[in-house]
Image (cartoon, rainbow, N blue to C red):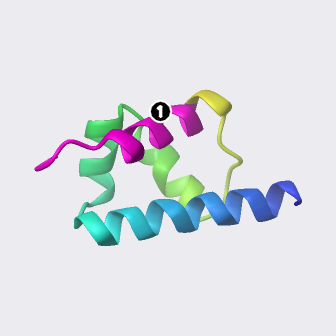
Amino acid sequence: MSEKDQVNAFSREIIDFQRKNHLTDTEMALNSHVSVEHIHNIKAMREAPDPSVVANLRDYMEHKPNGK
């Protein structure tokens, strides 16, 4: 899988997660400790995320507490 395909797949994961949990980019950023700019850029496929950013977002998505 190419880097562009990986970024596209990860951006879809984020979008699907946000829809499922009714989260805005700002809420996602605050709760995951990733800047809203990074989230916007990943979703728009303007940047390949740094591995630490991916790890933070994946950790949050896997362990999201209820109500956050």
Q: What residue lies at 41% left-to-right and 38% top-to-bottom?
A: 35
Amino acid type, mark 1: Asn
Quadrant position of residue 44: bottom right
Q: Residues within 10 Å of mark 1 (few under 14, many from 20)?
A: some
Q: Position of residue 19 (x, y in %)?
A: 32, 72
Q: Position of residue 42 (x, y in %)?
A: 58, 54
Quadrant position of residue 20: bottom left
Q: What residue lies at 48% left-to-right and 56% top-to-bottom?
A: 40
Seen as rendered, the residue at the extreme top is 52
Is 62 within the magenta? yes
Please tell me whether the stretch drawn in magenta is mainly helix, strand or loop: helix
Identify the element where label 1 is drawn.
helix
Q: What residue lies at 68% left-to-right and 50% top-to-bottom?
A: 47
Q: Position of residue 17 (x, y in %)?
A: 39, 63
Residue nearer the viewer, 66 or 41: 66
Classify residue 60 as left or right of residue 49: left
Tell me where the magenta segment starts and ends, as one range.
53-68
Quadrant position of residue 60: top left
Seen as rendered, the residue at the extreme right is 2
